[in-house]
Amino acid sequence: MSMNAAESNVPREPNDGALTSLVQVLDASVQRLADQVEPLTPQQVRQEAYPTEWTVADVLSHLGSGATGLRLRLDGDVEMQAIWDEWNAKDPDAQAADSLVADDLLQERLHSLTAEDQDTMRFAMGPMELDLLTFLGMRLNEHSLHAWDVAVTFDAGATLPDDEAALIVDTLPMMARFAGKPTGIERDLSIRTVAPDRTFALALRPDGVTLSSGDPVDEPDVVLPAEALIRLVYGRLDPDHTPAGVVGAGHLDELRQVFPGF
């Protein structure tokens, strides 16, 4: 039995709910950032952010240009250099305000995605081809970590929200391949996270770094919150922003060299 035109235009929910859940977590991340940014003064917008070579406005401009590029890329090819040039030409106040608008426009587009989009959309990224969930997951990673860059500028105790950490932690094996820098040391470490609970095996080799899901062990080498492991892989777990009570904290100095940030 065929559908009529009206029925065919009704967006379908993703089959497994994964896309809906991801978009909802991004909604929350976008709202948290807006709540943080909207009260900022012009002076605060120009303040040095966590990556010391960037101001708060620079971080927001990066997120805004990324949101614009991703939204357009969902519908075809995009020239990112032109988008970056446009955002770089904005003054800091416009970068901050416009980034929130760009976030909202992207979220509006994401809410229009369907189960068919989830099944069929593919995106080239370097030598890889990513499905829609993986592609949007990278946006969540970027948004969450850069929102933290803003939040920690004004609150030294800021952490990644639990709902974001619960999704990002499972992307760390892929991200560690790109973020990890061999230090010449050969070592294997077991890592357990809490909130959520995960077990990883970290292999340090002279020619590469791999992080993979591992079997639970009785006494892991390192135990820390999942959000802290995420920040470690992204180069954001310096001693001043490391939670108390990390088991195996003596390994962290070495791991900070393995994951210097990007």
Image (cartoon, rainbow, N blue to C red):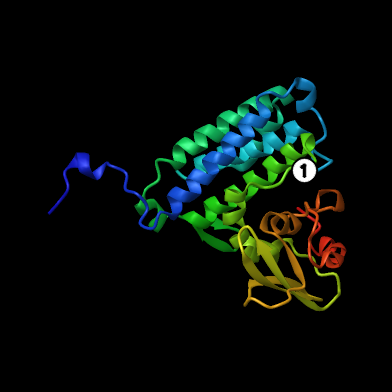
Residue at 71% from the left image edge and 28% from the top image edge: 89
Side (left or right) of 180 relative to 134:
right
Q: Position of residue 13 (x, y in %)?
A: 34, 49
What residue occupies the far top of the structure in this picture?
A: 42
Q: Which residue is nearer to you in this view: 91 or 124?
A: 91
Query: Hey, what amino acid is under mark 1?
Result: Gly
Q: Which residue is nearer to you in this view: 52 or 159?
A: 159
The residue under label 1 is 157
Q: Position of residue 36 (x, y in %)?
A: 67, 31
Residue at 80% from the left image edge and 41% from the top image edge: 156
| Element type at mark 1 | loop
Question: Height in image: 31 above or below 197?
Answer: above
Q: Which residue is nearer to you in this view: 65 or 191?
A: 191
How many marks the image carries: the answer is 1
Q: Position of residue 35 (x, y in %)?
A: 63, 30
Question: Height in image: 162 above or below 226?
Answer: above
Q: Is residue 48 visible?
A: yes
How many residues crowd mark 1 within 10 Å: few (<14), some (14–19), many (20+)? few
Q: Is residue 82 visible?
A: no
